[in-house]
Image (cartoon, rainbow, N blue to C red):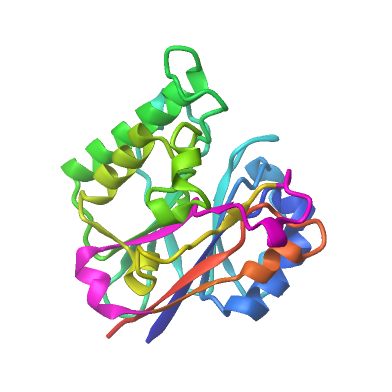
Amino acid sequence: MDLTIASWNINSLRLRQGLLPRLMSGLAPDVICLQETKVPDELFPEAIAGEIGFPHVLKRGMKGYNGVAILSRLPLTLEENTPDWCGKNDCRHISARLETGGAALVLHNFYVPAGGDIADPALNVKFAHKLDFITQAREHFAAYPPRRSVLVGDLNIAPLENDVWNHKQLLGIVSHTPVETQGLNAWMAEGFVDALRHFVAPERKLYTWWSYRNRDWEASNRGRRLDHVWVSRDLEPVLAGYKILKEARNWEQPSDHVPVSVTLKLG
């Protein structure tokens, strides 16, 4: 079977839930992982999932900030024993077992802290939190190596030179500093493969985020690749395709992130 998993930082689910049918039209996913839902679980608009044909919903949310959710055509089981990252209980990760008809897949949906504006952990507690989060995630997957696993989300780091519009200019900017990119690559190296770069050579530019501050984002094209899909190494041979729905940045009241998807051809 072909399995398509989409990931999108929706930047407020209640504000942008009406855009989900357009995501369906553009990517035709079987699973949608959302970040920055910004809604507590008791107010989560589950009806929209049913309207787009996704009867299975898992969510972990809080009022006004963060929040992650998984919507699926296929049955999901919550993975209960996920860490409380940095002891903050701030709804940045949800994990599930996805029933595919054969062996289950483990699916991780992450929203890594953005890290604020100052790239110095001594001066910026948000940046310190981000670095701690990345370290803990790497240590966790070192202790529990991934098998038949997919990790998606807004990881808030553009790790490669061509994941940003200007590598030299952004080396001191949060999301592309060496300490962040090295940390993210070390986390990925604990058993994952960068699925988007499996299809798009590192020499090519690849972006998933364009700032609201750029009035004509498309003309300036000052993008960054902050949204990622990783697969465990055992799944690399079944990677079958990818899409980045760049047109979503022009939707009415868009998120500053666009949806991405990867398709696996499972036996």
Viewer-side residue, 91 vs 43: 91
Quarter of the view holding residue 201: bottom left
In the depicted structure, whether residue 26 falls above or below residue 110? below
Q: Is residue 218 magenta?
A: yes
Query: Quarter of the image containing the C terminus?
Result: bottom left
Query: Which segment is the magenta one?
Result: 212-240
Q: How many numbered discs, if any?
A: 0
Q: Is residue 30 left or right of residue 150?
A: right
Q: Is residue 50 visible?
A: no
Residue 68 x/y as whole percent: 55, 48
Quarter of the view holding residue 135: top left
Residue 44 x/y as whole percent: 69, 50
Query: Quarter of the image containing the N terminus?
Result: bottom left
Q: Is residue 43 visible?
A: yes
**Looking at this rendering, what residue extends furthest in the top direction?**
122
In the depicted structure, whether residue 116 falls above or below residue 218? above
**Looking at this rendering, what residue extends furthest in the front direction?**
168
Name the residue located 68 percent from the left edge and 56 percent from the top edge: 220
